[in-house]
Image (cartoon, rainbow, N blue to C red):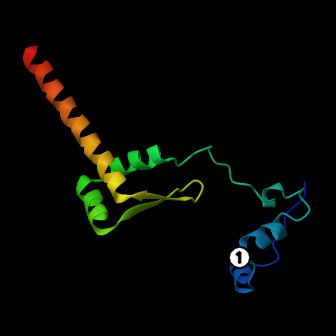
């Protein structure tokens, strides 16, 4: 088994301007192919940030915060963390979606209350 020799301390390497990849190449020199340095292509789910997912995500935010965003802007911009795509949703569409979700939640609460009192 080969002993790895470090040419200098990590501090000296950083001071000399070596980046992490260069330091690893020095440390691992002669130990085999450095496959972890090969460029990687990020993968993403198809349609990872469709409009439905954007609107569902907005429903997770506090209603007052979303209302402030809608009142201050004509549109809502959401950047997908997976693919980097920016989705732009008109404020009216966001408001309609939130109103529909609130109405559905109210109907659900009323139904639950009726079920509880009838039991």
Position of residue 52 measured from the top left corner of the image (x, y, whole percent): 45, 44
Instruction: Name the foreground residue: 4 vs 13.
Output: 13
35 over 109 or under it: above or below: below
Identify the residue at horizontal 78%, vertical 57% (top origin).
36
For mark 1, does the 10 Å Cα neighbourhood hold few (<14), some (14 to 19), or many (20 or more) residues? few
Residue under the point 23% across and 57% down: 64
Q: Quick check: 63 above or below 47?
A: below
Q: Position of residue 51 (x, y in %)?
A: 47, 48
User: Residue at (21%, 30%) from the top-left corner?
Assistant: 108
Task: Locate residue 73: give its quadrant.
Answer: bottom left
Left or right, 104 with reference to 19: left
Residue 10 percent across, percent down from the top left:
71, 76
Name which quarter of the figure residue 115 lies in. top left
Image point (70%, 81%), residue name: 14
Query: Would you name the residue on which mark 1 appears?
Result: 10
Picture coordinates of residue 96, whole percent (x, y): 30, 48
Which residue is nearer to you in this view: 111 or 42?
111
Count all numbered tags in the image, as a single digit. Answer: 1
Could you tell me which quadrant the C terminus lies in?
A: top left
Q: Residue furthest bottom?
A: 16
């Amino acid at each position: 088994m080969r002993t790895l020799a470090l040419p200098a301390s990590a501090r000296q390497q950083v001071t000399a301007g070596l980046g992490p990849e260069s330091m690893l190449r020095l440390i691992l020199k002669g130990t085999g192919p450095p496959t972890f340095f090969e460029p990687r292509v990020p993968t993403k789910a198809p349609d990872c940030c469709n409009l439905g997912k954007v609107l569902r995500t907005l429903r997770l935010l506090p209603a007052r915060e979303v209302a402030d965003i809608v009142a201050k802007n004509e549109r809502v911009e959401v950047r997908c963390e997976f693919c980097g795509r920016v989705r732009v949703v008109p404020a009216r569409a966001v408001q309609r979606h939130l109103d529909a979700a609130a109405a559905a939640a109210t109907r659900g609460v009323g139904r639950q209350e009726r079920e509880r009192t009838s039991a």
